[in-house]
Amino acid sequence: MAILVEKLRSFGIGLVIVGAIWYLAYIVIDRAVMPNPMLVIQSLPTLLNHNIGTHFMHSMYRAFMGLFFSMTIGLVVGILAANVHAAKVLTPFLYFTYPIPRVALLPVIMLVFGLGDTSKIIMITLIVAYPIIIVVRDSVKDIPKETYNTLICLGATRVQMFFTVTLPWAASGVLSAMRISLGTAIAILFFTETYGTSFGMGFFILDMWQRINYVLMFAGIVVLSFTGFIIFVFIDVLEDVLLRWRK
Amino acid sequence: MFLANNMLSLEKVSMRYDTQEVLENISFSAGNGEICSFIGPSGCGKSTMLNILAGNIRQYTGVVSLKGGAIDHRAMSIGLIAQDYGLLPWKTVLGNIVLPLKIKRLKVADYKQKIDFAMEKLGISQLSKRYPNQLSGGQKQRVAIAKTFIMDLNLLLMDEPFSALDAITREETQEFFLDIWQQNKPCTLFVTHSIEEAVFLGTKIFIFSHSPGKIVAEIANPAFLKSRADAEFFKTCSAIREIIQKEWGGT
């Protein structure tokens, strides 16, 4: 309960700071594209007339699926990459492909997997999985050898050592990596929702922009940010439950 | 109650990393009721010897036998207590203590009495739901000791287990250890660089040379279980100090 109060407090303070900066920007820029934050907040209920629930759920679905696959792939490939033998192939591959701007592969992904959710989720996964792979690989490499030694002495099998030490150790790295890549995930989500769909927060924002309805466009940005915020809280709660031992 | 026939013997055990000899012709034997203390300068290979017995090093020459045959880590119960405690940070105290049972696929329920007894004896009953990060060094080491003693040990290996603890905690933890060790008195090898510790805890004391490690002296310890203030304790420490000064050449 105390944690919840603490989180709400921190949310409130953040809201006030962002609100103040926004208001200042509204005064300084003084153009229609930067509306008064109070106006945007007042317009939030009218979003309901624009089917906002459906847009929101579509975005949530794509974001969660993307993060889920990124996490799974990150965990599996990251653990493999920490293995001496697999690393001989994986390290050069990761090293070579890491700097490639994977967003630029969008045309290929679109042509192969279509305009629907599959290509959007693949785009998010393609980008978010990378940092997770790297964090997991490094955290597995950092496991002290002594941790395995007591288990070897007990006659533990390789499978037992994997499930007792390697996997939990790697899993603790995944959550930290997810938190860091969340911003990127939402950015890619927005990007992928600008094509081939008439649902999702990205579509909604662009749609309102084209209709020159800047107030509702900003309301859409607020909701998209809220999507990110919900996922952030979700990761926070997961961390609190699964990584209690860190405190 | 002694466990039947847990004789450990090493015969001419040698080991080299690449071209460098680390251990040279280590031979000795030990059984139940014995704690063999090993003192040696850093890098003399005494930890390497334990790692061979723990199954972490496989390239060595010579013969190691326990209960008359090769060491089978899966079938036998060999405990390892290291300086870094060897606890898994994401498991609670109790979760760490039952880990050896889980690895050996034994039913935790069958060992409940032993677990309670060991935790009680080591003064950690109240800590069972805590995580290692929430414990002091001494408490962590007591958990590591409890974890080892819930098994019916064939052999116990201790690699500088008290070195990371401050002086007061160290002596207290040693007392805790001796108290639970005396229940079954499993055959124990104890590596240390402290003469006082070796004398306080060892029934026998072995002195290693500089690298490559050889055993240069073996002493039956008359001061075992005697108080640190006892004259015998003091005499034994001095005798060992003399041997060390001669053998290690003033280091």
Image (tube, rainbow, N blue to C red):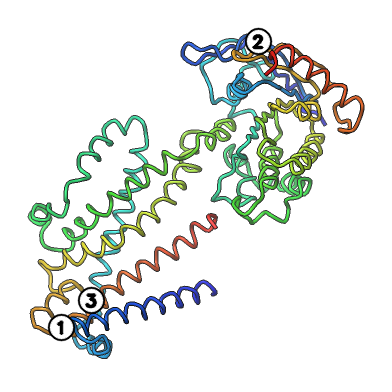
The residue located at (23%, 53%) in the rendering is A127
The residue located at (65%, 16%) in the rendering is B65
User: Where residue A205 appears, x then y in whole percent?
Assistant: 16, 76
Give the numbered dot on residue B176.
none
Please name the amino acid that badge 3 sits on.
Ile
Q: Are marks 1 and 3 in contact (CB under 8 Å)?
A: no
Mark 1 / mark 3, whichever is N-terminal: 1
Please give the residue where the numbered disc 3 appears in the rendered image: A221
User: Is label 3 or label 2 in front?
Assistant: 3
Secondary structure under tag 1 reads: helix
Please give the residue where the numbered disc 1 appears in the rendered image: A214
Q: Are marks 3 and 2 on the same chain?
A: no
Secondary structure under tag 3 reads: helix
Please name the amino acid that badge 1 sits on.
Tyr
Number of dots carrying numbers: 3
- Rendered-image quadrant of the C terminus of chain B: top right
Left-right relation of A167 to A123? right
The residue nearer to you, when weighing A140 against A57, is A140
Question: Can you say whether B130 is above or below A156 in the image?
Answer: below
Question: Can you say whether A211 is above or below A161 in the image?
Answer: below
Left-right relation of A91 to A113? right
User: Where residue B172 appears, x then y in whole percent?
Assistant: 78, 42
Please give the residue where the numbered disc 2 appears in the rendered image: B11
Q: Are marks 3 and 2 in contact (CB under 8 Å)?
A: no
Secondary structure under tag 2 reads: strand
